[in-house]
Image (cartoon, grey):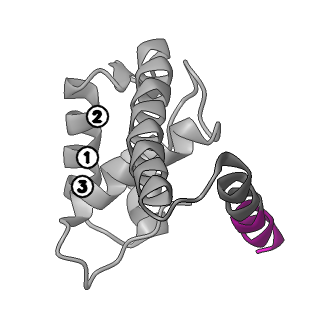
Amino acid sequence: MIRINESSPVPIYQQIIEGMQREILAGVFAADDRLPSIRDLAVALKVNPNTISRAYQELANTGTIYFKRGQGAFVTQKSTDDLLEQARGQMEKHIIEIVAIARSMNLDRQAVRKIFDAVLEQQEAK
């Protein structure tokens, strides 16, 4: 579920875009799945329908979703592939940073994996 943080400096429409992208990455919405209507999502998130409309339009402009006249908004196949590739790229960037930190601390591969596994276990327990 998309969450809106009204105290965030990030505009609400951008929070909605990021939330929809996360839901697509998580598999909540797959290619060609119909998204909630603008009105339904506005009610659920307690925001102005124009804000949802703006977010959907931005998602359409980037090729993440497409509209069918009279039927609503749908997820593109390209978006699921692109978002997954972007996520992998971001993860790789962070892993490279972590490896650099580990090397500066003279940690070997086994120590890094042990730390990584411990963090994964903690997150899975939540």
Image position, residue 112 (x, y; %): 65, 56
Q: Is residue 119 left or right of residue 33?
A: right
Q: Are marks 1 and 3 in contact (CB under 8 Å)?
A: yes
Image position, residue 32 (x, y; %): 55, 18
Residue tagged by mark 2?
59
Q: Amino acid at mark 2?
A: Leu
Residue tagged by mark 3?
14
| Mark 1 vs mark 3: in front | 3
Q: Depth check: give the residue in front, 122 or 79.
A: 122
Region in magenta:
118-126
121 within the magenta span: yes
Relative to 80, residue 124 above or below: below
Relative to 73, residue 13 above or below: below
Residue tagged by mark 1?
55
Mark pair 3, 2: CA separation = 10 Å
Residue 13 in sight: yes
74 within the magenta span: no
Image position, residue 13 (x, y; %): 23, 57
Residue 71 in sight: no
Quadrant containing the N terminus is bottom right
Image position, residue 3 (x, y; %): 46, 69
